[in-house]
Image (cartoon, rainbow, N blue to C red):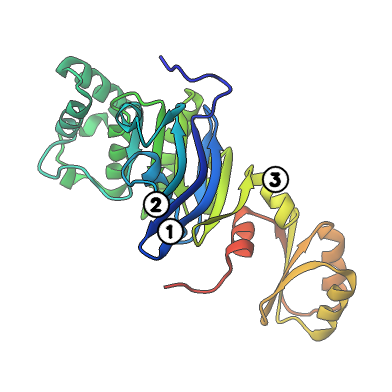
Amino acid sequence: MSDINENQPVISARNLKKSFGLFNAVNDISFRVDKGLCFGFLGPNGAGKTSTIRMIYGFSPLTSGDIFVFGLDIKKQYRIIKARIGVCQQENTLDPDLTVMQNFKVFARYFDLDKKTALERASSLLKFFALKQRSDAHVTELSGGLVRRLVIARALINQPELLILDEPTIGLDPQSRHQVWDRLEGLKKQGMTILLTTHYMDEAARLCDNLVIMDHGSILAQGVPQSLISEYTGESIIEVAEPEDDLRAFLRNKKERQEDLGHRLIIYAENGHELFREISGRFTHKSCLLRSATLEDVFLKLTGRELRE
């Protein structure tokens, strides 16, 4: 049974920093993760997401700041914390020489589970993740989607109170991604707290109750996905291809929020339908599109659209 006070966050991070020499991977960030929620870290590659979660589960020492998990100090009580969490890293850490069930049994030893308990839990998890029919298959026989589901399932063998997922669906096809999402939503319904990193905006919008958007080691925005959309972009987006100068002057006069990409205008509109009719009727014979704003629009507005190394 969990001894977490209902009002106490599962994770509390204060003024967290992580440096590698002169490079600051995580630069003075603070956040909290409440019990029973899915909390997301969004950001481009190199934003500091993985560096942050590696500190949370005790893999990487803090440069400075504090992290408390279940009210326990990660610097002093990481062994107790690690016994109560499950971690799914980006990399496939399964043993290719073993079968699916054998991977569970070996992993269960890290948590000092007896054979009977390990077998019961493994069987239940394989059924939950729709892997029961592959229990005797070798890992090398599985598709990428099955491997990812297996890695997540194995991370639950110790019945953790907190599940940490680093890019849980990276490289998967759409069908496999949705299968993973379905299982993660099932875990949320059971009351599990989930922490995930992702750069898939649709994944974050579907799974996360709360999230932060990071870049260059800092938090740029934090909140509920729909609230972030309302705050940073408004409800509607108008995209105009090959905009003309008179349209630009019109928008400046109306003080509409916009991004001018040269060949394309991105307009963040509060009253999208009315403005769309006016623009398409008065100013352009080119492509003019009205659509709902998404978390991806917020992400691109905050982190930029340029290519990165």
Q: How far apart are marks 3 and 1 (CA)?
A: 27 Å
Q: In this view, does 280 lie to the left or right of 89?
A: right
To which residue does mark 1 refer? Answer: 25
Q: Is residue 197 left or right of residue 89?
A: right
Q: Which amino acid does label 1 sit on?
A: Ala
Q: Which of 227 and 134 is in front in this view?
A: 227
Q: Earlier in the sequence, mark 1 or mark 2?
A: 1
Q: Position of residue 135 (x, y in %)?
A: 19, 31
Q: Does the CB distance between marks 1 and 2 fall below 8 Å?
A: yes
To which residue does mark 2 refer? Answer: 51
Give the residue displayed 58% in from the left and 68% down from the top.
304
To which residue does mark 3 refer? Answer: 227
Looking at the picture, does residue 174 appear above or below residue 150?
below
Quadrant position of residue 240: bottom right
Quadrant position of residue 283: bottom right
Identify the secondary structure beneath mark 2: helix
Q: What residue type is labelled 2?
A: Ser
Q: Which amino acid does label 3 sit on?
A: Ser
